Amino acid sequence: MHLKIEDTRLSTLLNSIFIGILIGLIVSTFRLAIEHLLEISQSIYRLASSSWHWLALIVVINIILAVLVGLLVKTSPQISGSGIPQIEGQLSGEYEEKWWPVLWKKFTGGILAIGSGLMLGREGPSIQLGAVVGQGWSETLHYSGSQRRVLIAGGAAAGLSAAFNAPIASTLFVLEEIYHNFSPLVWISALTSAVVSNFVSLNFFGLTPVLAIRYPHSLPLGLYWHLIALGILLGLFGRLYQLCTLNLKKWYQKISFLPRWLHSLVPFITIIPIGILWPSYLGGGNSIITAIANKNPIFMTLFTLLIIRFIFSMVSYGSGLPGGIFLPILTLGAIFGALYVSIMANLNLIDIHYLPNFVIYAMAGYFAAIGKAPFTAILLITEMVGSLQHLMPLAVVALTAYIVLDLLGGEPIYESLLHQLVPTITATPSGPQDRVEIPIVEGSKLDGLAVRNISWPKESLLISIRRGSNSIIPSGDSVIKPGDTLIVTTHRGNRKKIAAHFAKIN
């Protein structure tokens, strides 16, 4: 028996293993540093509640941190925010960044911002850290075009996997939300690097799932109407979150007396009263999620927590500090799910014992709505919780929330943030050659058309049609079929323009 492995796939596997190990070490260190710094910050806030000396120290420390992190963002604006829109833009050809400054500044700035208690997530920075490691390795090997993109996408998956210990969901997130293409080389790279980085991370944090929530009661079928109601509410709440997030930069611009890089002072100062009164509310929120599921808080506690987390996650993210919205979104979803059960239990419409279930369901529904990535949401929560028992209710809530947000005109949040980062798509008729993969879906307007009858954009050339495991060299008489993938070459700067052209007619 003769075993044959294509050179391209073999090199992709080997490179993915290497960057998976490297990213696993970097992101695990990143996680550990944030956790330890957050514990120190919460301890100091508890001391400040009874001593003005500690309060004064916190004010001084937070001002210094705001200036330091603000300077990092000022010198490298690419580290601002979660980093996911930047990676999506880079993979589409709209955006470029130098990998080394982003790597060390995002690492340092993320630890200082998230570890100090601001309501930001570690997952976005982890994804960007992974992507720039992939970029750096590709540049070391002098890769370009699709080879370079494959390693960037694989690095992004590895970063998320090490952050949440969810390799399958991380792979799907890159394909569904960032790369928007199920290219074989991309999913091989993404899955390999995600599994390897997850293995490294497990050696740091153990085998316990990130959100180990125990729920002994399965939801009866007679209560499934609650899933529809919850999904509708999450869709509405998700659209509110989107609108607020997309207007944050505009609202911050009204603080005209501070330069943009010093907007970091706003969250670092305003978080102080929250830290003194409720130190456990600080940080990304994963400890809050497990606490809610295990302790069944009363209605007013949940309502207060929801308002505080919503407002201060906006204040934190809108300042441009390095930190994500991924984990804050899950935290808000968990609180909303618990609040829903609390209300329904008071109305005698559901038993309060189902609160942990709805914490889980609502996390998936809220992320599915805001990110418009229901598959990722279902798999992510399944891996983070560590149980397959809730797949059906997760799917019902996620799909309902997704449909509601779609009817309200919402777009995927990271794609919308990318449009703010790169407002217009412009053609670049020069630069290195690159390729775009156009999947032909069922019902496409291109179905049944001959190549000669298709309107091809300028500066583009169809070089191959991938049909199953075969590659067809096209001619004018070649007929396009559903399931095909068109391989089109163009200049790097035109990739997004070409993809947008076919998205309209596909």
Image (cartoon, rainbow, N blue to C red):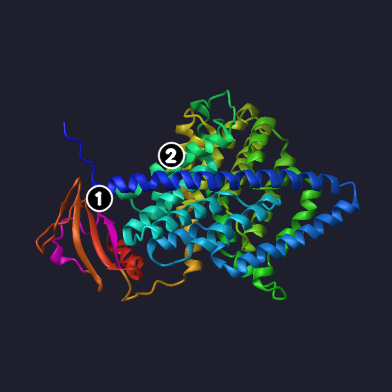
Tell me the quarter of the picture where residue 295 sits. Answer: top right
Residue 242 visible at all:
yes
Q: Is residue 95 magenta?
A: no
**Could you tell me which residue is drawn at 53 percent across and 50 percent down?**
126
Task: Determine whether the residue tagged by mark 1 lies in a helix, strand or loop.
Answer: loop
Q: Residue furthest front?
A: 140
Answer above or below: position of 434 versus 16.
below
Quadrant into which the C terminus falls:
bottom left
Answer above or below: position of 303 versus 134.
above
Mark 1 crowd level (few <14, some 14–19, many ≥20, 10 Å Cα): few
How far apart are the alpha carbons under marks 2 and 1?
Answer: 32 Å
Task: Determine whether the residue tagged by mark 2 lies in a helix, strand or loop.
Answer: helix
Q: Position of residue 477 (x, y in %)?
A: 9, 61
Nearer-N-terminus badge (2/1): 2
What residue does disc 1 label? 442
Foreground label between 2 and 1: 2
Q: Position of residue 341 (x, y in %)?
A: 63, 35
**Could you tell me which residue is drawn at 56 percent across and 60 percent down?**
243
Magenta-drawn segment: 433-455
What residue does disc 2 label? 195
**Could you tell me which residue is drawn at 77 percent across and 49 percent down?**
275
Quadrant into which the N terminus falls:
top left
Q: Is residue 91 left or right of residue 336?
A: left
Q: Position of residue 469 (x, y in %)?
A: 19, 45
Q: Is residue 415 left or right of residue 249?
A: left
